[in-house]
Image: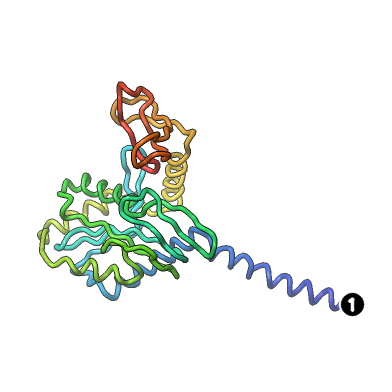
Amino acid sequence: MEQSLSETVKMMWWLVPIALLAGFIKSPWFKGWFGEALVKLFAKFRLPKDVYHPIHNVTLPVADGTTQIDHIFVSRFGIFVVETKNMKGWIYGNERQAQWTQKIFKQSFKFQNPLHQNFKHVKTLEQLMELSSEVIHSVVVFTGDCTFKTAMPANVTQAGSYISYIKSFKTHVLSEADVQRIVDRVISTKLDATWQTHQQHVRHLQSRNDPPSNRKCPKCGSEMVLRTSSKGKNVGNQFWGCSTLPKCRMVRKIGD
């Protein structure tokens, strides 16, 4: 009996690292890292580096903290700002919705519209580089075992199909000098890719998405308060509004 107990204990010790590994693989951090790694892999073999200059994992300082961009590809055909989503299940959404839906069997989960999420990244680069919005393109890439159940815009892609979207732009809109200037500016401006930078960005996101937290109005400096729309197409949706309303009518979407 003692021998049987000893064998059971040994077997249990083997299960511990297996359980830890399974938990790690299922973690949001690993899913995000794996999705970004797939995008890098596709780009390595299908986007020539001498034409499409890649810059990965870019954290840039902004007025209210930081913004993190998964991938930037700079070329004479434009700047492509890529947001990755490693998800499974059925995906529902359209350009105008604030939130999209992920459905796994009978369970449904809401997540921020990745096009809206990437809009801030695009605008950050637009202001940093002092460029026209026409030369910067937003691209969303879903990796993982997911299926689109609604029609998606051309710039919302799956796995390696984002390459075809990027290559569909055939007209030169930037010079070689412009491309080099943009690459140098992004590299010199982005924060070092350290654990401290990542943690700082995570804290910024948590503070930004925490309803009780205090926010300042970018227009007048007063506190922003959480409000709920009572009419129109956004009825029932929450948003940030200036506390001095109606004196100041500044509003922002949740997540901005």
For the point 49% across and 55% down, the residue is: 109
Residue 4 percent location from the top left of the image: 84, 78
Above or below for 44 versus 30: below
Q: With 97 as the anchor, is 102 left or right in this view?
A: right
State the residue at coordinates (11%, 64%): 171
Res 154 visible: yes
Looking at the image, residue 217 lies above or below residue 169: above
> How many numbered dots are placed on residues in this image?
1
Q: Is residue 89 left or right of residue 77?
A: right
Nearer to the camera, 55 or 111: 111
* Quadrant, the C terminus: top left
List the residue tagged with mark 1. 1
Q: Position of residue 157 (x, y in %)?
A: 32, 66
Is residue 55 among the parts visible in the rendering?
no
Circle 1 residues within 10 Å: few <14, some 14–19, many ≥20: few
Tell me where residue 183 sits by quadrant: bottom left
Query: Could you tell me residue 178's position as x and y percent?
Result: 13, 56
**Residue 173 against residue 3 in the figure, above or below:** above
Q: Position of residue 232 (x, y in %)?
A: 34, 38
Residue drawn at x 88%, y 75% as measured from the top left = 2
Q: Is residue 4 left or right of residue 215?
A: right
Pick the front one: 199 or 26: 26
